[in-house]
Every structure is written in C-alpha cells, then in structure tokens.
Image: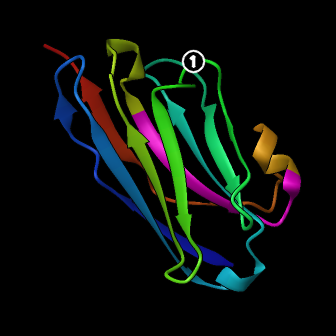
Amino acid sequence: QVQLVESGGDWVQPGGSLRLSCSATGRSFSIAVMGWYRQPPGKQREFVAAITNEGAANYASSVKGRFTIHRDTTKNMAYLQMNNLRSEDTAVYYCNADRSINNLYGRPSENADWGQGTQVTVSS
C-alpha cells in the first residue's frame, strides 16, 4: 500500500495559478503511474492528468495546455502545475498511485491508492 498526501490547494482568482504537490510513502517502488483526479461540487470524480515512471503524460482535454504534471521519482513526489485557472476548475483534487498502466488513461484499478484530497477554489 502507498500513502499519499496532497498539498497546495487554495483559493485563487480566475486566470491565476496554483501548484499542487503529492507525497508518496510506503510501497512507492510499486507505483507505475501517478495521477491527479478532481471532484467538482455535486459531480463525480474525473480524470485530470497522469504520468508514468518514464515521464509519459496524459491530460484531460479540459486542462490540456493549461495544466502540467511532473514527477520526481527520486523524492516520490508528483506535482500538478495549474495555470490560467477557470471557475470550472473548482474541485477537490486527489492524487493517486497505481500499478496499472490504465491509470494513465483515466482508468484506475480497484487497487489504486488515493490521497485525502485538497480543495481548489477559483472565484473572483
């Protein structure tokens, strides 16, 4: 099992930027793909971005060109740089870690580990 802790969520005005961080501890050597998902108010959780150990990344169409996912495997960290934020980006953002490559495409396995989430609010 992998323990994940997210940080960096905050309130920001539209057009602003935030950087989310995710720290992984435990059986982090078993991680193949780390991802970011979000759950907007009143909606289901949705895929945002994911990255493999080798650095291959995939993004939801709604964030492509605005968000960038990074991973530091030496520190067992993953980051989500979010630029040009919009009100519709308001959500609780979750980090996950999965041994399945399908997580890269927004299809986490039932054995994926999840963090507790961090709130991002985009509002004027």
* Quarter occupied by the C terminus: top left
Q: Residue type at mark 1?
A: Ser
- Magenta region includes residue 32: no
Where in the figure is residue 54, as x and y percent of width and height? 74, 65
The residue furthest left is: 124
Q: Secondary structure at mark 1?
A: loop
For label 1, count other residues whose C-alpha is less than 10 Å away and answer few (under 14), some (14-19) or many (20+).
few
Instruction: Please give left or right for residue 76 compared with residue 53 in the image.
Output: left
Q: Residue at x 83, y 53 (%)?
A: 109
As rendered, which of 116 and 81 lies closer to the eye?
Answer: 81
Q: For mark 1, what is the residue? A: 62
Name the spot of residue 103 as percent of width and height, x first.
78, 49
Where is residue 43, by image quadrant?
top right
Answer left or right for 121 relative to 23: left
Q: Residue at x 33, y 23 (%)?
A: 85
Q: Magenta span: helix, strand or loop, mainly?
A: strand
What is the quadrant of the N terminus in the image?
bottom right
Point 55% across, 75% down: residue: 3
Horizontal side of 52 relative to 81 (left or right) equals: right
- Give x and y (percent) for residue 102: 86, 48
Q: Is residue 118 above or below residue 25?
A: above
> Can residue 4 be seen in this snapshot?
yes
Task: State the image quarter where residue 31 is shown.
Answer: bottom right
Q: Which residues are magenta?
A: 92-101
Q: Is residue 107 visible?
A: no
